[in-house]
Amino acid sequence: MAIQIVMDRTGDSRHHFNSHDAQELAKAEQRFYELTKVGFTAAVRTGPGQVCQIRSFDPNAEETVFFPRLVGG
Amino acid sequence: MFGFRPLPPGVRSRKRATRALFISHGSEGTPEGRSLALLRKWLSPSQREQFGRKSYFEVVGSDSGRRYRIHAGASVNVCEIDEKGCLQEGLCFMPIGALPIGDVMLAQKIALETCEREVRTVARRFTPNGFHFRQIRPLG
């Protein structure tokens, strides 16, 4: 099972999906683009502690984290 | 006179261990606890170890190779450091929305390690001092 983790005020919302199920994959892809369209950044882990931003949906990503747009404090 | 007696040997360390256990596991159900658990999962082993010991961890900027220290906190908690580890310019930036501390710190780590230039464009600068980065309680 792959997972999309969306940061929010509760800590995060987690959306699990089966990447071998076309319907669930399509839903995950839709969620990806809905979030990035409104300014969320998507990132995946490429190794222990190593991260990479992704700008298009990766169906093979095991875990994707989304965080809202950054602003100066 | 007041009835204070020294604790028997071993009791103090047990109390300390119990407190540490409560902090690390007892808060997993709270937004802050969940966010810190996610942060720990995404840190490298050396960053995790540093965070546990010092309540901050260091990252390397993706564009300049500069080093930054991310302290426990949700704002005014990032500082550039020099090769000797001395504090340089402070950067204040965070994701919008009232996110718990661990989420803010993870977003700051990812941003600095993947799009440092954009971070430096949006961040507000400040001059760091000991007050900004005082350790309140262990979070790592």
Image: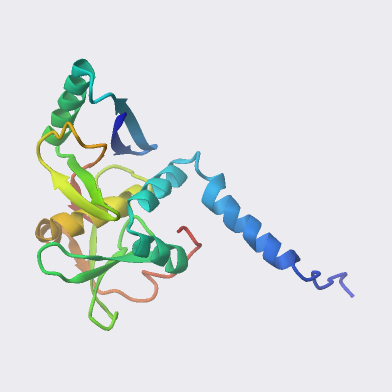
- Name the residue: 15% across, 47% down: A53
Q: Which quarter of the rendered picture does the N terminus of chain B lie within?
A: bottom right
Q: Residue furthest bottom?
A: B84
Q: Is residue B24 visible?
A: yes
Depth order, front residue of A73/B30: B30
Q: Residue at coordinates 25% horizontally, 74% vertically from top-left? A: B127
Residue B31: percent from left, percent from top: 43, 41
Residue B74 as seen in the image, left or right of residue B136: left
Asked if residue A21 is positioned above or below residue B55 in the image, the reply reads above
Please state the horizontal and vertical placement of residue B50, each as a whole percent of the image.
40, 67
- Position of the C terminus of chain B, as image quadrant, is bottom left
State the scheme by which the image is colored: rainbow
B75 or B23, which lies in front?
B23
Q: Is residue B131 above or below residue B123?
A: below
Examine the rendered structure and indicate whether residue B84 appears above or below residue A52.
Answer: below
Q: Residue furthest front?
A: A20
At a point 13% along the width and 30% down the height, the residue shown is A33
Looking at the rendering, which quadrant does residue A20 occupy?
Answer: top left
Give the percent coordinates (x, y) of residue B88: 23, 77
Rendered residue at 27%/83% (across/down): B84
**Is residue B71 at least partly visible in the picture?**
no
> Is A60 positioned to the left or the right of B105 in the image?
left
The total number of labels drawn is 0
Pick whichever, B123 or A66, lies toward us: A66
Of all residues, the one furthest to the top in this rendering is A23
Where is residue B81? Give x, y as percent. Answer: 25, 75
Decide if residue A65 is on the left or right side of residue B118. Answer: right
Question: Could you say which quadrant of the image residue B57 lies in?
Answer: bottom left
